[in-house]
Image: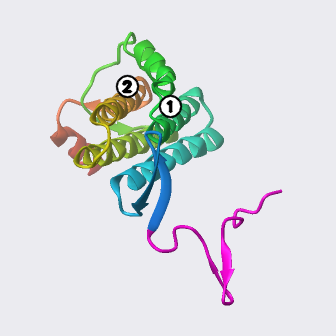
Amino acid sequence: MTNVFIDCLRIDGSIRCPGDGGFSEVIVFGKHVKLRKDHPAIELMGRLDELEALAEWGLQEIGGDEFRTIAAMTAALNTYLATGDDRWLTPVREIINKACELDSKELGWFIPNDKTTALLNLLRVKAREAERTAVRLLDDDLPANKVNELIGMLNQLNKYIAHLIFLSNVHVFRNVNDKIRTLLNV
């Protein structure tokens, strides 16, 4: 078995691991780079990891193909971010294309009516955070076509999750005032 500390060193009685100095060495769009830990690419990798972990938690806690699918889509997008290989986008595109053929119920402001839908809403919010982080990559010296493709795929992931929400157990409101009144029991 390999220890997760295998790349750490013992120096003068203390342990030093890669990344201790505020930088990470990662692969972004197939290129090995050293980036500060607050770089948008590192932040995006973390947001995608978080999204995938939440989907996997939903899979274990609640079950259901929607969480398995979101975890798989997120893993594929994170792998695309690392490799830049367009083949990782294929499963995401296939899922989005199928979802576009399904009509939702009514759209509007909503309140989830069960754990599944509430967790889907949390995943939707996390997907939007990842998309906003990806937009910050446009300011870096990264391939703009790859960044734009990733932004588009994250936007579609967000819409896919929202689509799942509106197909689930939600109470939909025509306006935000009705939602707020319902939440306040007015």
In the image, residue 6 lies in the stretch drawn in magenta: yes
In the picture of the structure, the residue carrying the numbered disc 2 is: 163
Q: Are marks 1 and 2 in contact (CB under 8 Å)?
A: no
In the picture of the structure, the residue carrying the numbered disc 1 is: 73
| Residue at 20% across, 39% down | 178
- Range shown magenta: 1-22
Of callouts 1 and 2, the N-terminal one: 1
Q: Give the image location of residue 107, x and y in percent.
A: 27, 25
In the image, residue 27 lies in the stretch drawn in magenta: no
Rendered image: mark on residue 41 = none
- Viewer-proximal residue, 110 or 137? 137
* 106 lies left or right of 81: left
* 30 lies left or right of 138: right
| Residue at 47% across, 74% down | 21
- Viewer-proximal residue, 12 or 45? 12
Amino acid type at circle 1 is Met
Amino acid type at circle 2 is His
Q: Residues within 10 Å of mark 2 (few under 14, many from 20)?
A: many
Q: Residues within 10 Å of mark 1 (few under 14, many from 20)?
A: many
